[in-house]
Image (cartoon, rainbow, N blue to C red):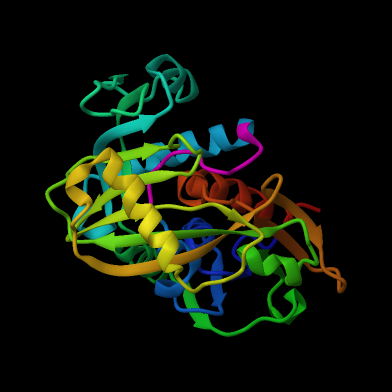
Amino acid sequence: MRGNGEVVVVGAGVIGLATAVVLAERGRRVRVWTREPVERTTSAVAGALWWPYHVEPMASARVWALRSLEVYGALAERPGETGVRLVEGVLGGTDPAGVESWTAGRLTGLRRATAREYPAGTGTWARLPLIDMTVHLPWLRERLLRAGGTVEERTVTELAEADAPVVVNCAGLGARDLAGDASVRPQRGQLVVVENPGIDTWLVSAGPDDEPAYLFPQPGRLLLGGTAEDDAWSLEPDPAVAQAIVRRCAALRPEVAGARVLEHRVGLRPVRDAVRLERGVLPDGRTVVHHYGHGGGGVTVAWGCAEEAADLVAAADSP
C-alpha cells in the first residue's frame, strides 16, 4: 500500500487543480506540473457558469455536475475568497420541468422566464453558481499549497518524465500529444469583456442562428460571449467575431451596445466525444490516470470528476 504516496498531476486548469486538491487533502504528496501559470490556463478564459456545456457522456456528467453543485454551494458562502457566487439568470431554450429533472430537484426557485427577462423565447429563471476564475484559480492553488502540494511551471513532452509512482494526466488539449489521442481537439471560444452597464443577472441563449450568446456579470466587468468553432487553433481575437458577439448580446440586453470594451479573450476548449477518465499503465509499469476531454464543461463537473479520479488513484494501491 502507498496511500500517502507521491502523485504528479500534469496540468493546472480547473480540472488539474481540483484533482490535485482532492488528492492532497486525502493525504497524497502532490506536485502539479503546468506549462503555463494558473492565471494563463484555458480555464482562466472560462465564463464560468455551472451548467453542462459540450461535455459527454451526459449520464456521467450529470453525476459529476451535481456533486460539483454541492461543493460550489458551500464555496459560495465565501465569495470574496473563493470567487464563487450564486447568481440568478436565464437559461434560454429550456423549460423549468426539464431543468428540474436534470438537476434532480437540487435547485429551488425555478420558473419560466418572462418575455422581459428573455425576449428570445422560452427560458428558465434559475439561481446557479457563477465563478470568477480570476479569483477561483488562484484560490484553488492556495488551497493545494495549504494541503502540502506544490505547483511547478515546466513543459512536459511525455508523461514518462513525471517522476512519481502515479501520474494524473489533466493536460486538456495537450493530451493530443502526451497521450497520443487525436480524438481530443480544440473548440475555439472567444469572448468580449466590457464595462458593466448595470446588469446583475446572467443570460445564456442559443440565438436564432444557433450562435451562442451569453452575458455573465463578474465583479467590475461583464463577460460577453461567445463562439464554438470546432478544430480552430488560433488564439488571436477576431475583430469581426467580437463585433458579432456584442451584436448578439445587445439584441438580448440593449444596454450593452455602447459598453466600453476592456479586453478580448480566446480559449481552446479540449473537446472529446467523451471525457476520458480511466486508469492505465505507463511503458515502465507506473500508474497513469487519464483525466481530460471536458470540453466547455470543466468548471461544471470539476469536483465530481476530481473525486472519481482520486478514487482511481487509490484503487491503484490495491494489489
Q: Quadrant of residue 317?
A: bottom right
Residue 9 on image: x %, y %: 60, 68
- Write the residue at 59% across / 51% down: 294
Q: Is residue 32 above or below residue 276?
A: below
Residue range highlighted in magenta? 47-58
- Write the residue at 66% across / 37% down: 57
Q: Is residue 47 visible?
A: no
Is residue 148 rendered to the left or right of residue 124? right
Is residue 272 rendered to the left or right of residue 306? right
Viewer-proximal residue among 219 and 179: 219
- Write the residue at 34% across / 24% down: 124
Asked if residue 50 lies in the magenta stretch, the reply is yes
Viewer-proximal residue among 305 and 196: 196
- Write the residue at 62% across / 51% down: 309
Asked if residue 75 lies in the magenta stretch, the reply is no
Residue 207 on image: x %, y %: 43, 37
